[in-house]
Amino acid sequence: MSAKLYVGNLSFDTTSDEIRDLFSEVGPVESCQVITDRDTGRSKGFGFVEMNSTAEASSAKAKFDGQDLHGRTLKVDVARPKIESRNNGGGYGGLRY
């Protein structure tokens, strides 16, 4: 079973390939993505890495959380599931009764 990690405090110059190479020191990386702004294409300073197993993800968290990369201290943690937002009518007062 795969496990997804949040990787934060990335330098804006850090690429997905660099993160993939780093995390592959612990085990196979299923996917890796540095999140970018859709308008500018610039990194938002965080990303996600999916490891093959929870054991490998735990090892990666222990090894890389607090490690320096490009002058920045990495923040690595288990990714939280995306919370689906309820659409309550949006803006201008929310729900109308």
Image (cartoon, rainbow, N blue to C red):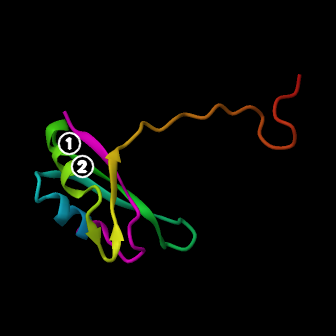
What residue did someone put label 1 on?
A: 58
Which residue appears at 87% of the width and 43% of the height?
92
State the image coordinates of residue 84 (x, y, percent, origin top left). 55, 34
Residue 89 versus residue 60 in the image, above or below: above
Residue at the extreme front of the image, as rendered? 66
Q: Position of residue 16 (x, y in %)?
A: 30, 66
Residue 87 is left or right of residue 60, and the answer is right
Which stretch did the figure color magenta?
A: 1-17
Q: Residue at x 28, y 69 (%)?
A: 68
How many circles with numbers are drawn on the protein?
Answer: 2
Q: Which residue is mark 2?
A: 61
Q: Magenta stretch: residue 39 in it?
A: no
| Residue at the image point whose x is 65% and y is 31% from the top | 86
Judged left or right of residue 35, residue 66 is left
Q: Position of residue 59 (x, y in %)?
A: 16, 46
Q: Secondary structure at mark 2?
A: helix
Question: Residue at (19%, 33%) from the top-left corner?
Answer: 1
User: Which quarter shows the C terminus?
Assistant: top right
Query: Mark 1 and mark 2 in contact (Cβ < 8 Å)?
Result: yes
Name the residue type under label 1: Ser
Left or right: residue 6 versus residue 87 is left
